[in-house]
Amino acid sequence: MAIGTEAMKLHLIPQPQYAEARQGDAVKLAELDATLMIPTRDDRLNRQAARLFRSVQDETWEHDVYALSAGGASLHPAHAERVRSRHDGYVLLTGGGQVELYACTAPGLYYGLKTLERLLATSAGANVPALSIADWADVPMRSDYLDLRTLYPTFEHMLAYIAELADYKLNTLIIEYEDKLPFRGDLAYLRHPRLCLSEQQHRQLLETAQAHYISVIPKQQSFGHLEYILKHPANLGLRETPDTVGELCPHRPGAYELMAGILIEVAALHPDSTHLHIGCDEVWSLGTCDDCRRSGMSREAAFIAFVNLLARHVRSLGKRPMIWHDMLMHATPEELRTLDSEVIVVIWLYGGHQMKADARRMIGSLREAGVAVLGASAVRCWDDSGDQNYPVIHNRIANIEAWRELALTEQLDGVIATNWACPFALGSPYGLFETSRYPAYYSADRSWNSRGDVSDYLQRFLLHYHGLRPEDAPDRWGDYTNSDYYQLMPGLLPHLRDHRETAELIAAMIAYELPAYRQFPLYTWLFRAVQGGGSEEIATGLRARHRSGYAQLKTAKQRMKAALDALLIPEMREVYLMSRFYRFELYEQHLSEIVDGVVPTLQVGEGEDEHA
């Protein structure tokens, strides 16, 4: 089969680096027998190949190349040289009833098989077209983030989402467990009494990640954001000040010993993890207590000294330590040079017109001190909206794009796409994890192929995530941009095939936002009732607007509850509902006191017919 010269664009996420049409008929994979030729046996490759071909057998050979042939195709290991120096690269040739696949690493071959799977899932007639692909990742570490501090998916959904990351060629998952990690022995008191993962669940989570070539990096806060640790009576005296409920004083006797013991447990629960993220961000009260002042150390010097103790301990456990950058922003060059050189500093900057300039300055300062750096974008963060229901997408896409550029120009080995569940552990939850997949896979697209065309990302996402083909869409694709996804969900919902529960949740949130925020909600006019002092026209007007506005809110609450039932356990569902409706119920109660005859309508009690 001769290779053609017609370049082609494949509607995949991520987009391949290079693809062209090839002479020959399309290939029906399910009718082909395949053979894996590999230097070292890896059952993960067999399992993935078995999802695609009629039968699979494997053999070991002396080449340092991983290869697959199907339909009687002859193998030519030299094809792998095209991607020899590339991250996770593979070469794929299909057509004329045959398939050839080559890679220099097991993950590379796996991602080639994943490309075949995605081509199959989105092609008509279950055929893969005749084509030639040479593909690789621009960024070695492509990371997603799972924040378990407040609300998170059911365990079954969590496993499905971890497996799904591989479809988009993500290879790293940072997990911030907090009190959801199944601490053992003397540390069992740190477990959440009801929501903690069981030891069996935790093992299954790690096994699922390993089965899909995803490296898990545990995130264990070790300096700030320790509310779930420092709330316990035995640890109260370790707070920097009594009012800083989550920040540790590094000079207090027992502080290091507490965190060292916790890090031993975290490392033991992640035997295959090569890294351990110890957090250490936003310790803003550091240096304010008497113990800190007596030390005579600057805040930055005290911070680095304690981080070095923790880092040395983490290295003794066989892990490489990672920390956030923000407490180092004002450190002097001399202070930075005292930081343990094995620490990886992750620079998290999520927006602002000076973001790239600030990032470059920080990267330069750390590298000058001999410190390795990674970047961190955000697929969801504060964005000046503490109760956002889904990511503020125009901000998130701009931030991901900025880090895409920085990854290239600064030669970064990785960008962590952070995904925060709440502004801080005790804060109101953001939207659910499910609503973040759109920017998360945008980040995956840009981390793999940073020079690809993103003008059609919306269409590609709707195809791969929701199963919506262009010909089935109600309107022309060209009328939409990448920032329109969330607002399109109510209209597209009837046409979606996959992940409908996510789409229904987004549609329910928009139905809630209309009466709550967008249509001059009633609570903004309550001052008129007080000002009017019993005025008939004000009371009558408020009653009329109450009937319409709060009726819409009640309907929205019922719809939201139904959407949440499919995604959260009941305890978490009630937390989320209360976070969205508590304020409005308080306003309505106050309105009832001001305007006679207004009866609360938002409360839904047990046994009440919510659909009446």
Image: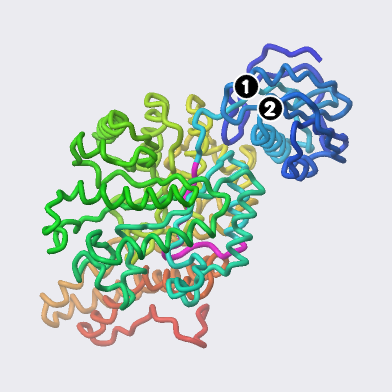
> Which structural element holds mark 2?
strand
- In percent of width and height, residue 137 lies at 55, 29
Q: Residue drawn at (47%, 39%), measured in percent from left and top? A: 443
Residue labelled with disc 2: 103
CA separation, marks 2 and 1? Answer: 7 Å
Q: What amino acid type is highlighted by mark number 1? A: Val
Q: Nearer the viewer, residue 148 or 168?
A: 148
> 118 and 277: which one is in front?
277
In the displayed structure, would residue 126 be above or below residue 496? above
Is 153 one of the magenta-colored residues?
Answer: yes
Side of 66 where 607 appears, left or right: left
Q: Is residue 489 left or right of residue 497?
A: left
Q: Which label belongs to residue 83?
A: 1
Q: Is residue 334 left or right of residue 20?
A: left
Q: Please provide the residue range marked out in magenta.
A: 143-156
Question: Residue 184 at what x, y percent from top left?
Answer: 51, 70
Q: Is residue 12 magenta?
A: no
State the residue at coordinates (10%, 75%). 531
**Mark 2 or mark 1: whose residue is earlier in sequence:** 1
255 in relation to 234, above or below: above
> Label 2 crowding class (10 Å Cα cut-off): few <14, some 14-19, many 20+?
many
Q: How is the image coloured?
A: rainbow
What secondary structure is found at the residue carrying circle 1?
helix
